[in-house]
Amino acid sequence: MNQQDVNKESVEFNKLEKKLRRNVGNAIVDYNMVEDGDVIMACISGGKDSFAMLDILLKLKQVAPIKFDVIAVNLDQKQPGFPEHILPEYFKSLGVPYYIIDKDTYSVVKEKIPEGKTTCGLCSRLRRGTLYSFAEKIGATKVALGHHMDDIVETMFLNMFHGARLKAMPPKLLSDDKRNIVIRPLAYCREKDLISYAEKREFPIIPCNLCGSQENLQRQNVKAMLNEWDRQHPQRVYSIFKSIQNVSPSQLADEALYGFKDLAIDRSGERKEYEYSSEEISSSGTGTEVQYFDINNL
């Protein structure tokens, strides 16, 4: 690679890094994800997304106008062949405080879930309970997960297609027992940018042997659908994500969110002019005069 190519690649990487930092910063501000004095427990799986999240959080920590701490935590689920040395060595190279939690959720999942069936649901619940309780033990005020915009949109479609629910993953979440707050700093970041970033930063990525090999996952089908849409309309995934930030309950059908049963006409005030509201009656079965009806007597 000649010097010109090196310079071009450096410029492109700087643009990408600034874009991701800006997106993370905007998400943090929009949802008040990080507050002064926070202790952020960054959950690191060994995948590209959590590595990028940790990398960006540590860089923002250096320049942020507030003070907060970041602690890296990995849950070692005892998957066969998991390279246990990689993450501790990486965390030490960064100088970031870290914990490795040992919990054999792998055996539990393999015992409970039949061969060929999706393991993600149970695996996720087991991880969540362990991480929530550990966050309390170390005094973490926020639990940071590496889900990005594509994850959030994919989850919405999965819930629609397979759960009949209009539900996604929020950028910020209070746990059901109100004892933990989960944040997703990458909520505004696209997966394709994170892939490029991980390649440039050469993160020591560890593949998941538990669920990564399940090619029949419904999430893979949704991802393929969104990738095709993204190819044809590059802004579509972004537009779908923006739609969950601009919800109009009155234009949906959930009676628990909007009182459809109690809707009533109110014509007591002066009516504003409707656009294109003038009309001409060419024919009527009520005579020459327009007949007005009292709806209370119908």
Image (tube, rainbow, N blue to C red):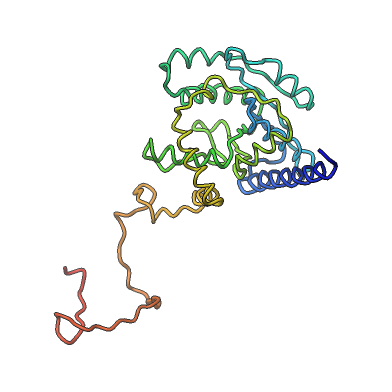
**Residue 121 at x, y percent in the picture:** 46, 26
User: Which quadrant of the figure has residue 4?
Assistant: top right
Residue at the extreme bottom of the image, as rendered: 288
**Residue 244 at x, y percent in the picture:** 49, 48
Q: Please give the name of the residue rendered at 21% of the width and 82% of the height, measured from the top-left corner.
A: 290
**Residue 209 at x, y percent in the picture:** 56, 19
Residue at the extreme right of the image, as rendered: 3
Which of 175/128 is in front? 128
Relative side of 132 to 291, left or right: right
Which of 222/19 is in front? 222
Judge whether 192 appears above or below 292 on screen.
above
Relative side of 113 to 211, left or right: left
Relative side of 228 to 183, left or right: left
User: Which quadrant of the figure has residue 142?
Assistant: top right
**Residue 170 at x, y percent in the picture:** 53, 41
Judge whether 65 appears above or below 248 on screen.
above
Quadrant location of the C terminus in the rendered image: bottom left
